[in-house]
Amino acid sequence: MRLVGKCLHVGVLDGQEFSKPDQGTVQGSIISPILGNIYLHHVLDRWFEREVRPKLSFSRAADSIRR
């Protein structure tokens, strides 16, 4: 968590200008795809398991969609 926090608060050097973003991640930052994968797992996959899978008629079809 400490490393993620450090990556979220890193500044950007654009030529001679240095700025720190107020929110989000810096575009091109290494942490951006990592956070995207965490979000994908915790939001999309859990939603699929809770809402979509129970409504599918074949459990094998549900297994093949998100694996």
Image: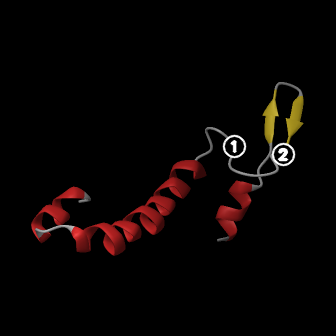
In x, y percent, where is residue 48? 34, 66
The kind of residue on which mark 1 rests is Val
- The residue where tag 2 is placed is 20
Q: Quadrant of the C terminus?
A: bottom left
The kind of residue on which mark 2 rests is Lys
Nearest to the observer: residue 10 or residue 61: 61
Q: Residue at x 84, y 45 (%)?
A: 20
Q: Residues within 10 Å of mark 1 (few under 14, many from 20)?
A: some
Q: Residue at x 19, y 64 (%)?
A: 62
The quadrant holding residue 59 is bottom left
- The residue where tag 1 is placed is 26
Q: Is residue 47 left or right of residue 26?
A: left
The quadrant holding residue 29 is top right
Secondary structure of the residue carrying tag 1 is loop
In x, y percent, where is residue 1? 64, 71
Residue lying furthest top: 15
Q: Is residue 24 left or right of residue 54?
A: right
Q: CA distance from mark 1 to mark 2?
A: 9 Å
Q: Is residue 33 above or below residue 2?
A: above
Secondary structure of the residue carrying tag 2 is loop
As drawn, the label of residue 34 is none
How is the model colour-coded?
secondary structure
Nearest to the observer: residue 50 or residue 38: 50
Nearest to the observer: residue 10 or residue 49: 49
Asked if labels 2 and 1 touch by Cβ distance under 8 angstroms, the answer is no
The quadrant holding residue 28 is top right
In x, y percent, where is residue 37? 46, 57
